Image (spheres, rainbow, N blue to C red):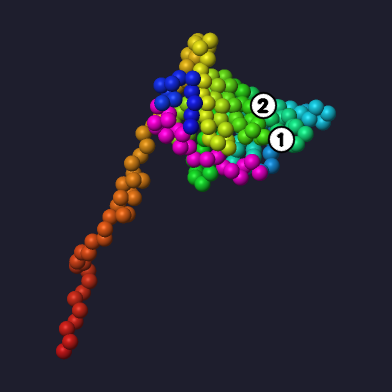
Amino acid sequence: MIRSANSAVLLALLLLGWSNLPRAENADRDKPLHMEADSVVIDDQKQTSVFEGKVELTQGTLHIQAEKIVVTQDARGYKHCTATGTPAHFRQKHEGSDQIMEGYGERIEYDTLAETVDFFGQARVKRDQDDLKGDHIAYSTRTEVFQVSGDPANADGPNKGRVTAVIQPKSAAPAAAATAKDAPLTIQSSPTLSKPKSKP
């Protein structure tokens, strides 16, 4: 299911299959969070860590690259990560396939408790050749629900304050292959087989 501020885009996305995205890698939520950066400042009292300089966050197949990531941890150990860059970059593999979902934004917020990723400022999400753009894209890694919205006040921005989508037609090759596989077998003569010898 996809919700959008533009009803025409909503209808197009529902009809063309963005609602049938493969599920995000379920095992990612149980993996440890790994961070790399040029520098880090850790405040144990506030339970915050500020990573700066070519920052990389990895959790299973989930990967975020940014210029700066601020990580806040709650009492139960769940983390909220705010990544900023020009742009910051997110990618994650989908469950049971090699498909990768990629997202971009001037700011990306990742919440390990809610299992959500929000893209702000020139937000963009890509899957194969499909492409969504808006001022804000909210994405649930658990339910695969997207909410894309434009900002009419940002009419001078690259997206002109609107939501845009490019949806490529899906190949009919898998259906054709399935049809061929289910076709009845036929028996044909072969010129390479020798005739049986007659008895003397």
Name the residue carrying label 1: 78
Of 5 and 80, which appears nearest the observer? Answer: 5
**Residue found 61% across the figure and 45% down from its top:** 27
Query: Quick check: 72 above or below 197?
Result: above
The answer to which image quadrant residue 61 occupies is top right
Query: Quick check: 140 above or below 150?
Result: below
Q: Secondary structure at mark 1?
A: loop
Q: Which residues are magenta?
A: 12-30
The answer to which image quadrant residue 7 occupies is top left
Q: Residue 77 at what x, y percent from top left?
A: 74, 36
Q: Is residue 159 visible?
A: no
Amino acid carrying label 1: it is Tyr
Of 153 and 59, which appears nearest the observer? Answer: 153
Residue 42 in magenta? no
User: Which mark's residue is nearer the viewer, 2 or 1?
Assistant: 1
Name the residue carrying label 2: 82
User: Dot 2: within a 10 Å radius of its alpha carbon, few (fewer than 14), some, or many (20 or more) residues?
Assistant: some
**Residue found 53% across the figure and 44% down from its top:** 95
Of 13 and 67, which appears nearest the observer? Answer: 13
Q: Main secondary structure of the magenta part?
A: helix
Q: Residue 19 at what x, y percent from top left?
A: 46, 34
Q: Residue furthest right?
A: 45
